[in-house]
Image (cartoon, helix red, strand yellow):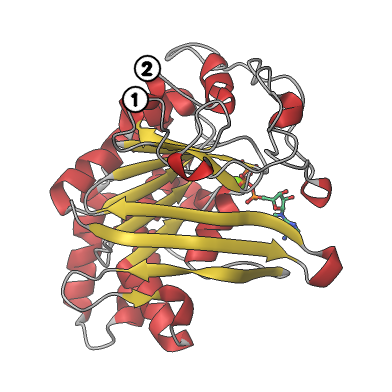
Amino acid sequence: SEPVLEIRNLDVDYGLGDRAVHAVRDVSLTLHRGEVLGLAGESGSGKSTLAYGLTRLLPPPGVITGGQVIYHPEKDSPYDVLALSDRKLREFRWAETAIVFQGAMNSLNPVHKISTQLTDVLRAHDPAMSEHSRNARAREMLKLVGISPDRMDAYPHQLSGGMRQRVMIGMALILQPQVVIMDEPTTALDVVMQRQILGQLIELRERLGFSVIFITHDLSLLVEFSNRIAIMYGGRIVEEAPASTIYRNALHPYSEGLLGSFPALRGPKRELAGIPGSPPDLAGMPSGCSFHPRCPKAFDPCPTTVPVLGPPADANAAGRTVACWLHPALENR
Ligand code: ATP
Ligand code: MG
């Protein structure tokens, strides 16, 4: 289907000049209408930086040093989010692309009723909307995320963590954005709750037709719930493919490692036992493929030359890309 968001060669640094660390490097990704794109990778691989970057919510000293984020609105012509004025950007953030951050459930304002927090979003976006319509809309949204409207007047502390998270999802969806980004929205919740909330989001997506970028370390959730998966390492995408393809046949040894440390679908979580060593230090990034020091299959070209991300020449390349010398892309040759 058609693209809704195209990230092109995005680079994000923290800091300037010699001190800069490159947290996101040359990332290109396309999100299609109605799909769920999963983004996985160990802690520090740049997942949140990518999400903040593409919505221009980077905290200082984060700076976007290159690339484009092309947004395709349903009716108007495409534009580059990175070139928007501040005013347009504010509109874009709520109405076109909404983001639910890591630990978002704790970012509800403790002194306001949840109804007020929901209707505030509507008021800010459309001051002309009547109070009656705002309340009706907020009520409908809560119902949609599985919260009984008689909890409208509750304060955040009167709700469970899972319910607060659902309120945040309701806030993200209330202006019917085309894209919803969830950045590890479920880490603080138990596994049963994670599944429920994700399942519910997918169901809402089917009804409302938005696209989702879902960010997590939990590959089991991604395999179950996403259409495609992109895997990040050291700020780069190292592999991208349909979820079932990665699950059956991961090409990058890092992806294999992540899958090897796949926690059981039910049961206790394990450490990333599949991959020895630790994620790279951005300040002293290894040369060549940055995974090579940890890679059990590294060979001659790996320490010296960065492999290009592209369709692998040696495998069934339909709809998949990888950046690995074991499966060189045509462009690498
Ligand atoms: P996690 O799974 O732990 O959320 P992540 O993949 O989201 O990790 P990021 O938070 O995007 O990773 O961080 C990417 C890199 O950027 C890390 O090396 C991190 O140390 C660095 N970084 C993040 N925020 C800042 C900051 N404000 N200043 C400097 N460096 C930062
Ligand atoms: Mg993160």
- Label 1 environment density (alpha carbons within 10 Å; few <14, some 14–19, many ≥20): some
Residue 137: which numbered mark, if any? Answer: none
Left or right for 195, reference 75: right
Q: Quadrant of residue 272?
A: top right
Q: What SS does tag 2 mark?
A: helix
Which residue is label 2 attached to? 248
x and y percentages locating residue 13 in the rendered image: 69, 63
Work out whether 200 lies above or below 138.
above
Left or right for 178, reference 243: left
Res 116 visible: no
Residues under numbered marks 1 and 2 in contact, where contact means CB atoms less than 8 Å apart = yes
Work out whether 61 lies above or below 209.
below
- Label 2 environment density (alpha carbons within 10 Å; few <14, some 14–19, many ≥20): few
x and y percentages locating residue 106 in the rendered image: 55, 52
Work out whether 149 lies above or below 52.
above
x and y percentages locating residue 184 in the rendered image: 51, 42
Asked whether mark 1 and ligand 1 are closer than 8 Å, the reply comes as: no
x and y percentages locating residue 330 in the rendered image: 44, 40
Residue 251 versus residue 176: which sits nearer the camera? Answer: 251
Q: CA distance from mark 1 to mark 2?
A: 5 Å
Residue 11 versus residue 42: which sits nearer the camera? Answer: 11
Identity of the amino acid at label 1?
Answer: Thr
Which residue is label 1 attached to? 245
Identity of the amino acid at label 2?
Answer: Arg
Which residue does the image show at 58% across and 20% down from the upper left? 257
Residue 155 versus residue 304: which sits nearer the camera? Answer: 304
Q: What SS does tag 1 mark?
A: helix
Left or right for 298, reference 18: left
Work out whether 242 lies above or below 143.
above
Asked whether mark 2 and ligand 1 are closer than 8 Å, the reply comes as: no
